């Protein structure tokens, strides 16, 4: 069974801080996704990774396939970054995604 | 591009009634649509995978007669919660693979169902 574990579950930080959210998974995957879920529930796809590192604005995602681990970083965090960040993986051969429980991030001004 | 529109965004219904949730791909053809459910403070869980023109594939533990999925066209998939009960109250969200040339998935905005 594929398990996706995220840490921390909750994170409160001050505006401007560097944020790191971690994700570990237990089986071989074809891709890993980082998603952002807003308070209303809507989900935005931030990154899809199968290796290495990606950067989009202040958001950076890295993955280590051998260690089955990924991190999402936010530089110069801002209150508008407050959301739930979800790690999801697509296991090799599977169609849908398996999700972590999410990290609830609050950035205080 | 690759937008999925989901309606309604929220619905309240009485026990025993049925509720239909629609997901439309607005600017691409979605041959495969995924339906997920999320209970409070829990992960999104895959309920079923629907392919245009064929029967949906349900995950273990999901009642196919209760959660009817129809994917009759390349731009529309529907989930009908039949004979809804309070325990069906949840957040339902659909997702589609982005079209060829794009990677990843695009998500609907979700439907919060409350059964009273």
Image: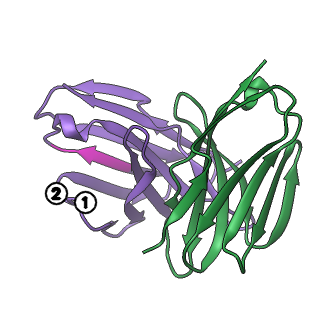
Chain colours: A green, B purple
Q: Is residue A94 above or below residue B80?
A: below
Q: Are marks 1 and 2 in contact (CB under 8 Å)?
A: no
Nearer-the-camera pick, B85 or B78: B85
* Residue B65 circle label: 2
Q: Is residue B13 magenta?
A: no
User: Residue A22, percent across and down?
Assistant: 68, 55
The structure residue drawn at horizontal position 59% and vertical position 54%, both measured from the top left corner, is A6
Nearer-the-camera pick, A46 or A72: A72
Give the secondary structure at mark 2: loop
Q: Is residue B57 above or below residue B26?
A: below
| Side of A38 where B39 appears, left or right | left
Q: Is residue B92 above or below residue B61?
A: above
Q: Quadrant of residue B13?
A: top left
User: Residue B24, percent across and down?
Assistant: 49, 45
Q: Is residue B29 visible?
A: no
Residue under label 1, please give it: B62
Q: Which residues are magenta?
A: B78-82
Q: Is residue B79 magenta?
A: yes
| Side of A27 where B11 appears, left or right | left
Nearer-the-camera pick, B33 or B61: B61
Quadrant where the N terminus of chain A is found in the figure: bottom left
Q: CA distance from mark 1 to mark 2?
A: 9 Å
Q: Quadrant of residue B17?
A: top left
Q: Are marks 1 and 2 on the same chain?
A: yes
User: Residue B14, percent across and down?
Assistant: 16, 26
């Amino acid at each position: 069974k594929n398990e996706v574990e995220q840490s921390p579950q909750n994170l409160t930080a001050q505006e401007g801080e560097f944020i790191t959210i971690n994700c570990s998974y237990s089986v071989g995957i074809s891709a890993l996704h980082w998603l952002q879920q807003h308070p209303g529930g809507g989900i935005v796809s931030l990154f899809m990774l199968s290796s290495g590192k990606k950067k989009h604005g202040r958001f950076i995602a890295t993955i280590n396939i051998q260690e089955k681990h990924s991190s999402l970083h936010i530089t110069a965090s801002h209150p508008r970054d407050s959301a739930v960040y979800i790690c999801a993986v697509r296991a090799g051969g599977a169609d849908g995604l398996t999700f972590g429980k999410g990290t609830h991030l609050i950035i205080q001004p | 591009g690759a937008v999925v529109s989901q309606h309604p965004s929220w619905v309240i219904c009485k026990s025993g009634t049925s509720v239909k949730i629609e997901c439309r791909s607005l600017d691409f053809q979605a041959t495969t649509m995924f339906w997920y459910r999320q209970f409070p403070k829990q992960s999104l869980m895959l309920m079923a995978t629907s392919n245009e023109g064929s029967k949906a594939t349900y995950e273990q533990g999901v009642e196919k007669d209760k959660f009817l999925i129809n994917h009759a066209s390349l731009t529309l998939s529907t989930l009908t919660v039949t004979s809804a009960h309070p325990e069906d109250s949840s957040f339902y969200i659909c997702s589609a693979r982005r079209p060829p040339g794009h990677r990843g998935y695009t998500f609907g905005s979700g439907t919060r169902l409350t059964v009273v």
